[in-house]
Image (tube, rainbow, N blue to C red):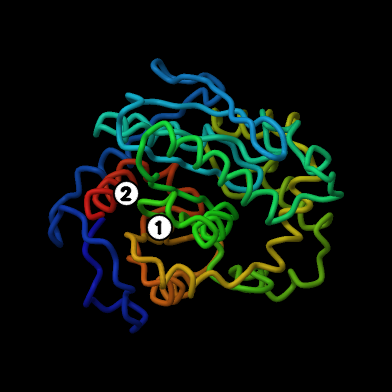
Amino acid sequence: MHRHQGRTRHDGGAWPASVPGPAAEGVPDPEARLDAGLPDLDWAVLPAGFRRTTYRVPSGVLAAIALGEPDGVPVVLVPGATGSKEDFVLMMPLLAAAGCHAISFDLAGQYESGGAGPENLVPPQPRYSYGLFVEDVLAVLGTVTAAAGRPVHVVGYSFAGTVAALALAARPELFASITLLSCPPLAGQAFRGVSRIGPATGLATGRVGAALMVWGIRRNFIPVPPGRLRFVRNRFTLTRRQSVRDIVALMKHTPDVAATLAAAPLPKLVAVGQHDLWPTTLHAAFARAAGARLAVYPGGHSPCETSPNQLSRDLLALISSG
């Protein structure tokens, strides 16, 4: 990733401050070259060395994967709506090679954690809520922290970025750093800022919004390679539709987490693709309000898939700064 700070865009605006990579302006970035040459994968097959495990949390049992030595620096990567732990399989070997113990898990209701849900809470609840997801994340972080004997570096992807920030507000002692990956940058009806379709999103219910989201992913409107498309289509057979509907409804009432983040005395990173759902200007404003550094990569909403080498480099730099 090149150093944008202090430059001017072609449209006359200022580039947001970004985390500087190791390459000077005009010098090829080795991580960017690696990302540009990423092959397609069979995402349903875990690479060698990964370990499958589970976490018992308030909503049920969450399926998880881990890579790296258990006594390594703990890093927990939390996927977002319609996602799964496999979204981080390109990053986790890079983190493990740097001495980290990388862990990821499916959110309740998603993919192989489809059996976890509000009916398992005490007392049972009718819907997935911010409270459910936050308590689940805290349960995982508590387990990881107890095993590691130190706080955790947390990455929250998209909707899970908001959940991670809420978890930080509740239990800051569990966090060593926080990275918000493609996190909604707006409080309230967060979809209102989505490029091109934002103004119309206020009219859609959670059910309609979820149906449109699933339909768009299945139709590959944001193109992904064949192996990736096959995997994301297949995992919908296990993902509970209610969880997607409820998450979409929750994102129309996104809490304002910027002040909480700004007050937290720990390393913070906002990481996004330059063609994310929300414009970079909104992410830059959110990063400033949160007191976080900003990293912008080529691609769209999924830098963990399209820029894993660059994102891992910057995440490791953040970890080292703590």
Q: Quarter of the image holding residue 306?
A: top left
- Check whether the beta carbons of the residues at disc 2 and disc 1 lie within 8 A of each other: yes
Q: What residue is shown at x 21% (from left), y 64% (from top)?
A: 3
The disc label shown at residue 271, or none:
1
Instruction: Pick the quarter of the image with the C terminus.
Output: bottom left
| Residue 144 drawn at (x, y percent) | 46, 35
Q: Is 181 in front, or is 60?
A: 60
Q: Using the image, tell me which numbered label, if any, was put on residue 318.
A: none
Q: Amino acid at mark 2?
A: Leu
Q: Nearer the viewer, mark 2 or mark 1?
A: 2
Q: Is residue 268 above or below residue 228?
A: below
Number of other residues with Cα within 10 Å of mark 1, as a class: few under 14, some 14 to 19, many 20 or more: many
Residue at 30 percent across and 31 percent down: it is 72
What kind of residue is marked 1? Ala
List the residue tagged with mark 2: 315
Q: What percent of the width, then of the height, locates residue 46?
A: 48, 20
Is 224 displayed left or right of 230 in the figure? left
**Where 245 sits versus 11, above or below?**
above
Q: Position of residue 76 (x, y in %)?
A: 45, 40
